[in-house]
Image (tube, rainbow, N blue to C red):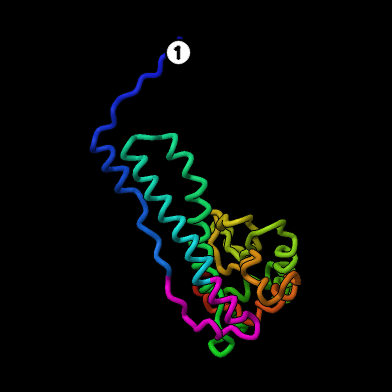
Amino acid sequence: MLRILSRPVKSSAVNRAFSSLPPKAVQPDLDYDFGALEPYISAEIMETHYTKHHRTYIAGYNTNIEKFAEAVEKNDVLTQTQLLPNIRFHGGGFVNHNIFWKSLAPPSAGGGELPKANSALGQAVTSKFGTFDNLINLTNAELANIKGSGWAWLAQNKASKQVEIIATANQDSVPGTHIPLLGIDAWEHAYYLQYKNVKAEYFKAIWNVINWKEAESRFLV
């Protein structure tokens, strides 16, 4: 007969586990008003997206890490493993949207203004994709090919330093091998109130408010 031996977890081990638990997620302020991205993204969408959807992910993440902490205290490994998918999903929703808000800027604040051709990012894009128009078209194709919900990212490969287009499903984030430079939300809540089922128009319009300055600040030379 197989015997499973267990030892009680010392308080010091629990304390170490608690010390490694992440802090609660807090929603960052937007750098612009809800209506500042009009007419490309409506004020109604921005307000709903920010105050409803993003906050739901934050609440879900915080609730699940609290439950995870309780499971750690009880040495309940089964509950810990059951909570991990929810933590990943809601945590991804929190982080992805933080990047998304920073990926946007009103035209009056430089939204849609491409980097200079001789800038580090400009050279990286033209070296990999030829032109920014080609990058945009390829990104829109990735967005259109997402089955269900997800994201498209312009990301920098940490090893090669090259820029790449990455698509992720649901609330999955850019892998740790890459640095997210820009993120575009392909979930229906990001466009449906304005563009209905014609999401290709949303993908086309959003480039008018893409914050390339933010992408340049994230790019590692």
Task: Judge whether residue 221 can be spotted in this image.
Answer: no
Task: Give the farthest residue toward the left.
Answer: 11
Residue at 49% in and 74% down? 217
Split into 4 quadrants, where in the image is the N terminus?
top left
Could you tell whether 161 is left or right of 191 in the image? left
Q: Quadrant of residue 58?
A: bottom left
68 sits to left or right of 168: left
Q: Compared with residue 84, is residue 111 higher up or lower down, i.e. above or below?
A: below
Residue 48 belongs to the span the image colors magenta? yes
What amino acid does circle 1 point to? Answer: Leu
Disc 1, SS: loop
Residue 142 position by quadrant: bottom right
Q: Residue 169 location in percent, x, y?
A: 63, 55
Residue at image point 57% right, 81% down: 43
Q: Is residue 76 magenta?
A: no
Q: Give above or below for 132 relative to 183.
A: below
Please indicate, yes or no, whether residue 18 appears anywhere in the rendered image: yes
Q: Residue furthest top?
A: 1
Near mark 1 (Cα within 10 A), the count class, few <14, some 14-19 or many ≥20, is few
Stretch in magenta: 28-49
Q: Which residue is mark 1?
A: 2
Residue 2 appears at what percent x and percent y?
45, 13
Indicate whether 167 appears above or below 43: above
Res. 155 image quadrant: bottom right
Most foreground residue, 215 or 194: 194
Which of the two residues, 172 or 148, is positioned nearer the viewer here? 148
